[in-house]
Image (spheres, rainbow, N blue to C red):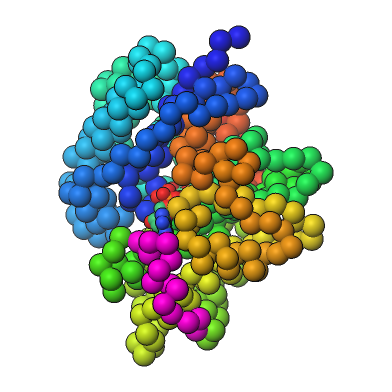
């Protein structure tokens, strides 16, 4: 059978830009043909940041931003196809996550919002788009997140071994790929988002490059303890969260104001590592694969290795997938699962009442 080509588009909670991948699926094998990061224009990034904070006359602003997102996604698709030397007619579909601006899975009327005018994306690219992956899972009582565990299971699991995959983006999420073939997982809490907010406040940098700011500070054990006391960490799974919960205000409420800025940064790094490590505690865990931007923070990786040993903590690249592209590949994978009418959610992860085919089709 001819391999099928899919494009995956992910723009995550860090708001650094759009990850695009071109993937060839020749079931059960997949190969990454081309990848690209398209940064957000500063004005769109600013708008998205504001829309992700509740209460800024969002309704009037959402419309234009949805169109601008579609335009940016389409530019990325065109650049990706040019770079890889493919034509739109050769692509089966684009799997597009959209841009999350609100995620409230646990209130009496749960909802999640991913922006992006997917009709416009289909019209601009001439390619079918599969999007709106989260809301069907929610309609069946699920959290609508995390969705990557099904993909992690398909590519990283090995029967007889307890493995874990950890995505450390703005928010961190884990997939536990158990020796018996079952998969569980959830959002563990902040990944890089609080470190990003803190270094931006004190050093006017978008993120703590190579962990330099964290490395200047010392760990504040009382603050670490205080941060870990938040109710989110006591809740049992299924659970998922977002930047509307873990933001700068959340951190500032827990500070005395006497702390040195670098010490807070060091403690935030340990906080992310500890919340992940606590979630992964189990006998006979052998391999932990890390993806997402957190893999480039050396102190975070060292903290994780220290807390999780004797399991090995390594980049997902050792298992054959570059850490920068795991999430975008997952959305290409979810689009091909839609086309094959295969379930995309893992009910044991999201808490949904049933396994569902996820996504909605937008035709050009
Ligand atoms: N060299 C580096 N040193 C330290 N941190 C880095 C480095 N490169 C990337 N990061 C971190 O990774 C983040 C981006 O990660 P990623 O692109 O995985 O997030 P995302 O996909 O937007 O988020 P999410 O998975 O929550 O949707 C940056 O904001 C930064 O904190
Ligand atoms: C609502 C939403 O967009 N959640 C994201 C976010 O970023 C990481 C974590 O929080 C995860 O739950 C999810 O993304 C991945 C792709 C997921 O659904 O698996």
Q: Residue at x 18, y 40 (%)?
A: 64
**226 or 35: nearer the eye?**
35
Q: Quadrant of residue 256?
A: bottom left
Badge count: 0
Q: Is residue 286 left or right of residue 307?
A: right
Residue 98: image location, x then y, percent: 37, 39
Q: Quadrant of the C terminus?
A: top left
Q: Quadrant of residue 75?
A: top left
- Report if residue 218 lies within the magenta region: yes
Q: Quadrant of the N terminus?
A: top right
Residues drawn in magenta: 207-220
Q: Residue furthest bottom?
A: 258
Q: Residue at x 39, y 39 (%)?
A: 19
**51 or 36: nearer the eye?**
36
Can see residue 207?
A: yes
Residue 118: image location, x then y, percent: 32, 30
Q: Residue at x 75, y 50 (%)?
A: 162
Q: Is residue 74 left or right of residue 159?
A: left
Q: Residue at x 52, y 41 (%)?
A: 322
Task: Tell me if residue 295 comes above or below residue 263 in the rendering.
Answer: above
Ligand 1's quadrant is bottom left
**275 or 109: nearer the eye?**
275
Residue 312: image location, x then y, percent: 68, 56
């Amino acid at each position: 059978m001819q391999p099928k080509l899919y494009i995956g588009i992910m723009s995550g909670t860090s708001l650094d830009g759009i990850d695009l991948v071109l993937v060839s699926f020749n079931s059960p094998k997949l190969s990454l043909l081309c990848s690209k990061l398209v940064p957000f224009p500063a004005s769109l990034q600013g708008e998205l940041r504001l829309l992700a904070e509740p209460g800024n006359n969002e309704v009037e602003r959402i419309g234009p931003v949805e169109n601008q997102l579609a335009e940016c996604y389409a530019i990325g698709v065109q650049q990706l196809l040019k770079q890889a030397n493919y034509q739109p007619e050769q692509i089966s579909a684009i799997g597009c996550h959209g841009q999350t601006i609100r995620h409230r899975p646990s209130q009496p009327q749960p909802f999640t919002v991913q922006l992006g005018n997917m009709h416009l994306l289909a019209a601009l690219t001439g390619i079918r788009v599969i999007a709106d992956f989260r809301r069907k899972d929610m309609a069946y009582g699920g959290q609508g997140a995390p969705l990557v565990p099904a993909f992690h299971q398909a590519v990283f699991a090995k029967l007889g071994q307890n493995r874990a995959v950890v995505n450390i983006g703005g928010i961190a999420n884990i997939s536990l790929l158990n020796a018996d073939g079952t998969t569980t997982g959830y959002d563990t809490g902040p990944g890089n988002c609080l470190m990003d907010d803190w270094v931006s406040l004190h050093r006017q940098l978008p993120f703590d490059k190579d962990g330099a700011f964290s490395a200047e500070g010392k760990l504040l054990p009382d603050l670490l303890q205080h941060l870990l006391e938040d109710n989110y960490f006591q809740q049992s799974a299924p659970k998922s969260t977002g930047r509307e919960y873990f933001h700068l205000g959340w951190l500032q409420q827990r500070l005395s104001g006497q702390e040195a800025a670098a010490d807070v940064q060091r403690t935030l790094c340990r906080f992310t590592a500890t919340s992940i490590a606590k979630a992964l505690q189990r006998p006979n865990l052998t391999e932990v694969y890390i993806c997402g931007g957190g893999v480039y923070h050396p102190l975070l990786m060292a903290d994780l290795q220290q807390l999780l040993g004797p399991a090995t903590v390594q980049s997902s690249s050792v298992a054959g997938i570059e850490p920068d592209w795991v999430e975008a590949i997952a959305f290409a994978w979810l689009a091909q699962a839609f086309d094959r009418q295969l379930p995309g959610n893992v009910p044991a992860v999201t808490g949904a009442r049933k396994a569902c085919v996820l996504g909605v089709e937008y035709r050009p």
